[in-house]
Amino acid sequence: MLNLIWKRPDGTFVADVNGKPYHVVDGDEPLWTAALIAAAKLGNKLKLEPAPEAVDPPPLTRLAKADLWRRCTDEEAEVLHNALSQAPFRLRLIFEAAQYLDSTDPDYPALRAGVVAALGEVRAAIILSPEG
């Protein structure tokens, strides 16, 4: 049993065949002929398959640690280095071991707070902005 659900923009059909969705294409006999007959009977009642919803790409969250230092002036790098040397030992080890910073990491807020304290909110936002 074939029950048409949609007509696709490419001229093929989406049908319910024995209770399951099925993509009916030219040459898929006897379903193709049955789909053409059913489509002719339905006429304008058979709607085009809706376009899929656009999906936004996930937000950027990562920054290579080397890029953090490249974005700093020499003076900012020295101030930031000194601030990091005052951070708790565990946080320093995590920072030193990381190849990149990820704003979804549980330790990121502490690191960001240190950068803001050392360089200010505006420069911290620029220096820590994720890569695109």
Image (tube, rainbow, N blue to C red):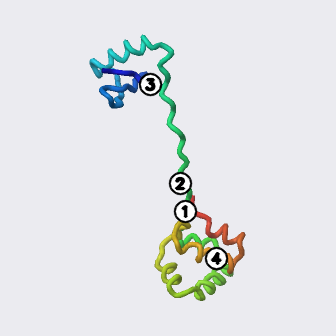
Q: Is residue 100 above or below residue 20?
A: below
Quadrant position of residue 111: bottom right
The N terminus sits in image quarter: top left
The C terminus sits in image quarter: bottom right
Amino acid type at image mark 1 = Thr
Q: Is residue 121 above or below residue 19?
A: below
Q: State the residue position of label 4.
A: 113
Distance Cα–Cα, label 4 vs label 2 = 24 Å
Residues at marks 2 and 3 touching, judged by CB atoms closer than 8 Å: no
Q: Nearer the viewer, mark 4 or mark 3?
A: 3
Distance Cα–Cα, label 1 vs label 2 = 9 Å
Mark closer to the chain start, 2 or 3: 3
**Position in image of residue 17 (x %, y %):** 32, 26
Q: Name the residue at 36% across, 31% down.
A: 21
Q: Residues within 10 Å of mark 1 (few under 14, many from 20)?
A: some
User: How many marks on residues?
Assistant: 4
Q: Is residue 20 left or right of residue 97?
A: left
Residues at marks 4 and 2 touching, judged by CB atoms closer than 8 Å: no
Judging depth in this view, the residue of 26 and 127 nearest the camera is: 26
The label on residue 6 is: 3
Mark closer to the chain start, 4 or 2: 2
| Outermost residue to the front | 19
Mark closer to the chain start, 4 or 3: 3
Q: Residues within 10 Å of mark 3 (few under 14, many from 20)?
A: some
**Position in image of residue 2 (x %, y %):** 33, 21
Q: Name the residue at 62% across, 65% down.
A: 129
Mark closer to the chain start, 1 or 4: 1
Where disc 2 sits, the SS reads loop
Q: Residues within 10 Å of mark 4 (few under 14, many from 20)?
A: some
Q: Nearer the viewer, mark 1 or mark 4?
A: 4
Where disc 3 sits, the SS reads strand
Q: State the residue position of label 2.
A: 58
